[in-house]
Image (tube, rainbow, N blue to C red):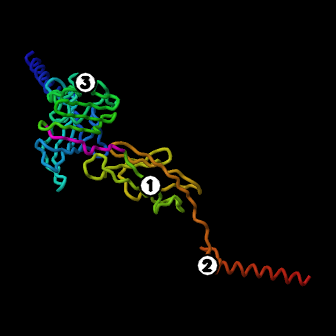
Amino acid sequence: MKKLNKYILIGITSLIFICPFLIPITKAQEWTYDGVDTTNIPDFSVYPSEMYVFNASGAGVPPGFSIIVEIVHGNITDYTGSGNGTCVWGNTWLWNRTSGEKTLSIVDSLFAYWNDTLEYTSQNLPYLIPVENNGLVSLSILNNFSEFSFFTSLNFEHKQAYPNIYSIGFWNTSNNAILTTNYTDDGILSQWESYLIPILPNITLDSQPAQLSPVFSFTAEDDTLIVNSTDFKIETTITDADNNNDGVTDTDYLYRILNGSTWTSWAAPTSLLDWDLGSVAAGNYTITMEVKNMYGVTQEEITIEYIPPAVSTDGDGFVSGYPIFLVSMVAILGIIIITYRYRKKLKI
């Protein structure tokens, strides 16, 4: 019996140590920059790596400087201590517009926290607005956003939400202080105007991410749509763009081509791509290509005319590819036959 109890105790102890390894552990979701595969941070319409540039003056901002807000990452966390919410984190830079030098001012601060029940909060100026599950701004969100403590702490005398233009306005008639924000229907900041000196610097939105899918074109090599071989090169041109507004031309793209009824695998594009129509007759053939970046996929198509090379002759009128000796022998044989028949006819 003692041995049995010993074995049972060992078994229970083993289960205690083993069970934690059998229970799946869910890792906290993190949204970071991942090239073409970067996704937007849920509950917001922003993507890691994006930048918003603001012109600023007064209240501690040196003359000739701009403020750059950089979206770095997002996650789900209990920032308030009251419940999990979607958080957007980022850096704030001071940009000397004359020298071009950028100085990191605030690192990894909370730009936005959103929970449907606990609603909105931020450690910074509230540049980012949440959106509904359908990805659009709503009146309830505009009203909730306007109740954020940053706005109420400024003691504005008037406040109004304008859902038809996705805008919020605050103003005072006593000292002309104003703050107006406008957004696209999917929550991208499109305008920010604030005149709040001496409390805060005057701030105006200068630029924001375009968030556009790629613009590209393609054709056969040498800018032609007519080929004499089924095996040729495709020349692709992607229009230069800076869709995340980070000051660098986009380079993260992938492409694929429709091959019959199936697509090729996604691959990094090059200026010239090898393509083969296969065993086809002369005629017109449509080629469909897609190029994607982190904002979406663009599809374009062209029609290539395939004209097989014609059988040519050389400069002496002989068919190319046949030896002159063989052609001559055939001609002499023909003359002999004709002469023989003519002499035979004369004898008759």
Above or below residue 170? Residue 69 is below
Mark 3 packing: few (<14 Cα in 10 Å), some, or many (20+)?
few
Q: Amino acid at mark 2?
A: Gly
Mark 2 packing: few (<14 Cα in 10 Å), some, or many (20+)?
few
- Residue 79 visible? The answer is no
Q: Is label 1 in contact with label 3 (beta carbons under 8 Å)?
A: no
Which structural element holds mark 3? loop
Above or below residue 259? Residue 143 is above
The CA span between labels 1 and 2 is 38 Å
Residue at 18 percent of width and 55 percent of height: 98
**Sequence-first disc among 3 and 2:** 3
Magenta segment: 200-212
The CA span between labels 3 and 2 is 84 Å
Label disc, if present, on residue 218 of the rendered structure? 1
Circle 2 residue: 315
Circle 3 residue: 116
User: Which tag is nearer the camera, tag 1 or tag 2?
Assistant: 1
Choose between 90 and 33: the one closer to the eye.
90
